[in-house]
Amino acid sequence: MTFVVTDVCIMCKHTDCVEVCPVDCFYEGENTLVIHPDECIDCGVCEPECPIDAILPDTDPAAEKWLEMNRKYSEKWPVITQQKEALPTAEEYKTIPDKMKFFSESPGEGD
Ligand code: SF4
Ligand code: F3S
């Protein structure tokens, strides 16, 4: 069991989620975050912290397609445990659907 970050996070990256994770299992890309599925303890505290509902439990049918993406990039990107400013594009992109076309494979800065 794990939670996953979906494409809703892309271009927004509010990072409220990372502050509450007890096991520090968020990893930062240039324009989104992911959760390491093997490190997540399924506590659920991050889900309500996201102001744009970008986090889902893997029990949600909509989460399945994001699981491998979370696994793949959590093994490539640096860990992030401290909140930082949201991306400048956060407001403009918060309701845009199907954001995978904006996804960057580049790592973020991490902590
Ligand atoms: Fe971290 Fe808990 Fe969210 Fe998993 S569900 S990413 S352990 S806060
Ligand atoms: Fe992304 Fe929401 Fe966290 S926008 S960075 S999942 S608080």
Image (cartoon, rainbow, N blue to C red):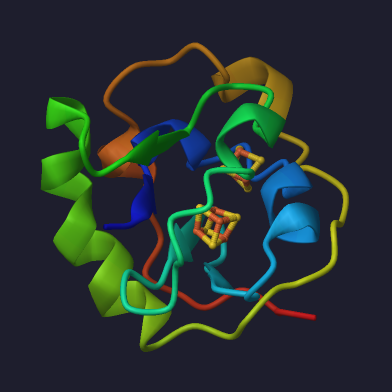
Coordinates of residue 60 in the picture (x, y in percent): 21, 29
Residue at 53 percent of width and 52 percent of height: 43
Coordinates of residue 19 in the picture (x, y in percent): 80, 57
Quadrant of ligand 1: it is: bottom right
Residue at 64 percent of width and 18 percent of height: 92
Residue at 16 percent of width and 64 percent of height: 68
- Note whether 98 is above or below 39 in the view shown: above
- Note whether 33 is above or below 46 in the view shown: below
Taking 78 as reference, is 15 left or right? right
Coordinates of residue 59 in the picture (x, y in percent): 20, 37
Quarter of the image where the C terminus is located: bottom right
Taking 95 as reference, is 70 left or right? left
Quarter of the image where the N terminus is located: bottom left
Q: So how many labels did they put on this image?
A: 0
- Note whether 85 is above or below 71 in the view shown: above
- Note whether 40 is above or below 58 in the view shown: below
Q: Specify the farthest residue to the top.
A: 95
Taking 66 as reference, is 61 left or right? left
Residue at 22 percent of width and 38 percent of height: 63
